[in-house]
Amino acid sequence: GVHYRREENFKNAENQNQRPDFFLDLPDGKHLILDSKVSLSAYLRYSESEDEHEKAKALKEHLLSIHGHIDGLSKKNYQELPGTNQPDYVMLFVANEPALHLALAEDIELFDKALRKNIVLVSTSTLLATLRTISYIWRQEAQNKNAEEIARQAGLMYDKFRNFTEDLLKLGGQMATAQKTYDAAMNKLSDGKGNLVSRAQKLQDLGAVSSQKSIDNRLLDQSQEDDK
């Protein structure tokens, strides 16, 4: 259900139902179709029989069965199913590897005959190699997506960091301005002869202020020193 689907129903151009055995998903929306309905009953008779005449007859039927399935599969034209994006060929899986080897040995043109009809004959070993290749492709796709996501996250982090540094610089400027304003206010408050703190303290000393609270000694010391 993630990288392949089994016996999924499709509608062909004539609105007829088509149900491939396996529908393999590939990156970039591409697909492979795998069919595995080859009958091996004639091959079993060939393998189990000890009579040469019966074996020859079973072998002939085995070849006819494979040819017939190739023809039938070619007519289904799976590669033209709407909504699919796949190569021009369909993989035909023969579950018993010796059965396929026997057929290929008996008819050395069998593979090419199938290929001309857009069918690729595969056995257990060749199918596994194909599936491993597909698995590798998916791993590479995942790694590429991870690299893209890392690059995207790095870009977002860089933008955030740049904005943060701009805010820090702006805050530094604002703090410098605030410090200058503070220094100017303090100069007016306690610096110089006749500063506000010394004048306020004189008023309190003269009894003109009823408050019992005193001005901070740090300001008084500074104002008295600057008032001299």
Image (tube, rainbow, N blue to C red):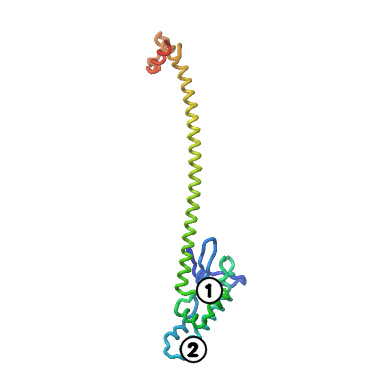
Which quadrant holds the C terminus?
top left
Residue indicated by mark 2: 57
Count how many numbered circles sit on residues in the image.
2
Residue indicated by mark 1: 120
Residue closest to the eye, 67 or 185: 67
Cα distance in 3D space between marks 1 and 2? 26 Å
Q: Residue 216: x percent and y percent?
A: 38, 18
Dot 1: few (<14), some (14–19), or many (≥20) neighbours within 10 Å?
A: some
Reading the chain from its start, which is encountered first: label 1 or label 2? 2
- 212 left or right, relative to 81: left
Secondary structure of the residue carrying tag 2 is: helix
| Up/down of 28 relative to 104, above or below | above
| Up/down of 147 relative to 14, above or below | above
Q: Quadrant of residue 193?
A: top left
* Residue at the top extreme of this rendering: 206
| Up/down of 27 relative to 48, above or below | above
Secondary structure of the residue carrying tag 1 is: strand
Q: Residue 194: x percent and y percent?
A: 45, 11
Residue placed at 45% from the left, 77% from the top? 97
Dot 2: few (<14), some (14–19), or many (≥20) neighbours within 10 Å?
A: some
**Three-letter amino acid code at the position of disc 1:** Val
Residue closest to the eye, 221 or 140: 140
Q: Residue 157: x percent and y percent?
A: 48, 44
| Up/down of 89 relative to 163, above or below | below
**Three-letter amino acid code at the position of disc 2:** Lys
Q: Residue 42: x percent and y percent?
A: 47, 84
